[in-house]
Image: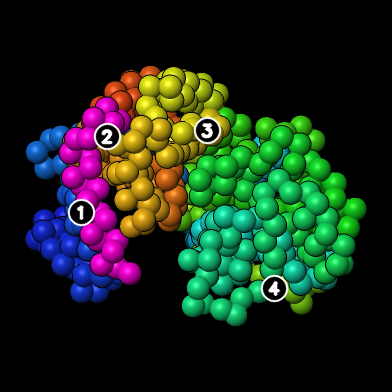
Amino acid sequence: MTGFDLAALLEDRSAERYALHERYLNHQLPRMLRTLGFDKVYERAEGAYFWDAEGNDYLDMLAGFGVMGLGRHHPVVRKALHDVLDARLADLTRFDCSPLPGLLAERLLAHSPHLDRVFFGNSGTEAVETALKFARRATGRPRVLHCDHAFHGLTAGSLSVNGETGFRDGFGPLLPDTAVPLGDLTALERELARGDVAALIVEPVQGKGVHEAPPGYLRAAQELLHRHRALLIADEVQTGLGRTGDFYAYQHEEGVEPDLVCVAKALSGGYVPVGATLGKDWIFKKVYSSMDRVLVHSASFGSNAQAMAAGLAVLSVIEDDQIVAGARATGELLRSRLAALTDRYELLADVRGRGLMTGIEFGRPRSLKLRGRWAMLQAARKGLFAQMVVVPLLRRHRILTQVSGDHLEVIKLIPPLIIGEREVDRFVTAFTAVMDDAHEGGLVWDFGRLLMRQAVSNR
């Protein structure tokens, strides 16, 4: 026995949390949190809620960027992890075949029967890296196409197909890639005609801005790609496992059967990092073409027992509790309630999305007084108004949300898939109060001036 006591360590050092980050981790994170007033101390969490030391509850409409699909500390997932730890399995021996990865692959593939095999890694970006490598090996071609404003991860390969220059700047040179506009089949065909394209990677609903692929685009793109002997990769890291009201977002469009599919986030149950790349049999056989190449692509912690147990438990809950249908119904309720406000608020430009992935976009108002304030914010930094809405939602109404991307006037809602009408009512009531304040010239604009000063000082 050692003298390690986790509970005592947390009790003794938790008050230092921000100082520890400033000294040893990303020093800009605590600075950003303090500027926004997001430097909260949460004591515990369950389901779709956090609680602070005073017992105040906070509604989570962010779900850890989509990781907490079933909310926090789901009892079925917790039990599965206790069970797998108690089983004391001979895990990660590297020279055996554990049943858990096979069982999880079998269950995942049941939701996409046109695919045959799975590679398990540890994150969404690793799932994307796997897909990029497999596509290049399977086709013998170097170039991968991606869509403008895409986000596929931040490791070197995934960064190469990231459509936001702010993430790429200073990290080149990257892999050969080309961006095409989402929905533009002419641009896609022009690039394919060059004969060096391995694949197109696409989010069926883009996380940055919550933009959905136009109707018919994915199927038409698939046909073009296959005609030119290239592959379609669906990045379902955020949209998969029920987020958009179907198990996978590509399933909204009939006849779409991607060659490779990337999943992660919600598969973890919020506990153990896991990523998965699903693909067709012939692609895997091209990669693992002989016994000499059995480890040509692997991950040290891939297929570990804890991650596999968490994934199996997550899929069990999704199926048993009809989580996908619930996400579809609750998402439709949320968007209909929000869309009804567009005529009431001139600053509210659009409400869009699928399932429990919703984008709320703000735009230039009509009235002269509001136009002047809007113009000042835009001159300082685009995206400040959306931040002005996010901050009072947390500070005044104890609801955690996020701006959908840098320089975007869009709030993205990706709550746990277990929320219902009570949480929709709470969010819409709070959002209405914040928008009332914004249109009346209230405290929201006082915070806007602080943000403007901060934006100017950062130039």
Asked if the residue at tag 1 contacts the one at tag 3, i.e. Cβ–Cβ closer than 8 Å, the answer is no
What's the CA distance linking mark 4 and mark 2? 45 Å
Mark 2 highlights which residue? Answer: 438
Question: Around disc 2, counting alpha carbons within 10 Å, would you say few (fewer than 14), some (14 to 19), or many (20 or more)?
Answer: some
Asked if the residue at tag 3 contacts the one at tag 2, i.e. Cβ–Cβ closer than 8 Å, the answer is no
Q: Quadrant of residue 134?
A: bottom right
Q: Is residue 392 visible?
A: yes
Q: Secondary structure at mark 2?
A: helix
| Residue 171 location (% of width, % of height) | 51, 77
Mark 4 against mark 2, which lies toward the viewer? Answer: 2
Ranked by sequence position, the earlier of labels 4 and 3 is 4
What's the CA distance linking mark 3 and mark 1? 29 Å
Q: Tell me if 238 is positioned left or right of 385 in this view.
A: right
**278 in relation to 24, above or below:** above
Q: Tell me if 405 is positioned left or right of 35 in this view.
A: right
Report the amino acid beneath label 3. Arg
Figure quadrant of the N terminus: bottom left
Q: Which residues are magenta?
A: 434-459
Q: Which one is nearer the viewer's eye here, 69 or 433?
A: 433
Q: Which one is nearer the viewer's eye here, 456 or 80?
A: 456
Report the amino acid beneath label 2. Ala
**247 in relation to 377, above or below:** above
Mark 1 highlights which residue? Answer: 450
What's the CA distance linking mark 4 and mark 3? 33 Å
Q: Secondary structure at mark 1?
A: helix
Figure quadrant of the C terminus: bottom left
Question: Residue 352's mark?
Answer: 3
Please identify the residue farthest to the bottom as the structure is shown: 173
Report the amino acid beneath label 4. Pro
Ranked by sequence position, the earlier of labels 1 and 2 is 2
